[in-house]
Amino acid sequence: MPETTPQPPPHPAWENGWAPDTSRAPGTRRLWLAGTLAIATVVACVTAIAVSHNAPDKASPSPTATANTDNGPGLLSFASPSAPGTTGPPKGTSGMSTTSPTASASKSGTATAGSSGAGPKSAPSSAKPSKATPSKGSSGGSAQQPGTDGKSVRSVNYPDRYWHVSGSYVYLDQPRGSESREDSTFELVKGLANASCYSFATHDGLYLRHQNFVLRAESNDGSSLFKQDATFCPQKSPYSDDVLFQSVNYPNYALRHKNFQLRLDPYGYNTTNREDFFFDLVDGLS
């Protein structure tokens, strides 16, 4: 006979006071709790989506919000000259410069040649300055008309000094003797690249042009680059008769004296030493 393990006798329900609940299926309470939690989660998500859709969008910044609000003492707003065929900086020896203007030279300083290194002189030609009189400057202000005896260019903040050609460069010097006065007198002619602007011709048939951003006196080689380098548009100060000479091929650059040498530097609202950029056209010294 197989052995059997004796089983303890079942206790009747009435002996321990407990009886199984047969009124509902097992696990119903857990199902109810899970369902309630799921419904609450869905309701929270729907509420968050509705709130985010109904929230007002932030106003987009106006295009003018980023405009320059600098209320600095700027005098000019440079626009590109209307010279035909001039759409950007030309190729050639006049490279862009990122140097910012520095403090003006003291009155006791002496003129020294710049170390920026100018390129070789252009080949001389037989072109002679035109006798035509320039019309109004590109800024809309009335430009001074050249006299029959030529014009000299005097510094505003150094009124005893004038543009003076010496060794093919142009300095801000005091006139000394007849030869010095002759080299400080120029004929204003129609701009070689823009007839509404100026070109400066010397007594010996050269023109003032910027090369490597330094002002030089050179022969006209007839090239488009030379004509643009030798053309400057007068911009009249709204406060006086002082004139600023803006480059035709670098509209944001203008002639200024630095260490008593004439060169081309950036000019704008943040420019310091503004008087270094302004000059007076006076009767020729010679």
Image (cartoon, rainbow, N blue to C red):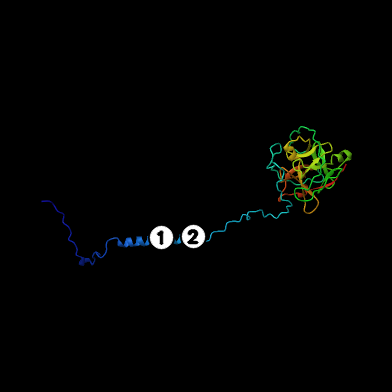
User: Residue 196 is drawn in which quadrant?
Assistant: top right
Residue 279, image x, y percentages: 80, 47
Q: Mark 2 or mark 1: which comes first in sequence?
A: 1
Q: Mark 2 points at which residue?
A: 53
Q: Helix or strand or loop: what does disc 2 sit on?
A: helix
Q: How crowded is mark 2: few (under 14 residues within 10 Å), some or many (20 or more)?
A: few
Residue 195, image x, y percentages: 76, 43
- Say which amino acid is labelled 1: Val
Residue 119, image x, y percentages: 74, 34
Residue occupying image coordinates x 41% and y 62%: 43
Q: Can residue 189 be seen in this view?
A: yes
Residue occupying image coordinates x 35% and y 61%: 35
State the residue in front, 81 or 116. 81
Q: How crowded is mark 1: few (under 14 residues within 10 Å), some or many (20 or more)?
A: few
Q: Mark 1 points at which residue?
A: 42
User: Residue 47 is drawn in which quadrant?
Assistant: bottom left
State the residue in front, 184 or 192. 192
Q: Which quarter of the rendering shows the C terminus?
A: top right
**Residue furthest out toward the left:** 1
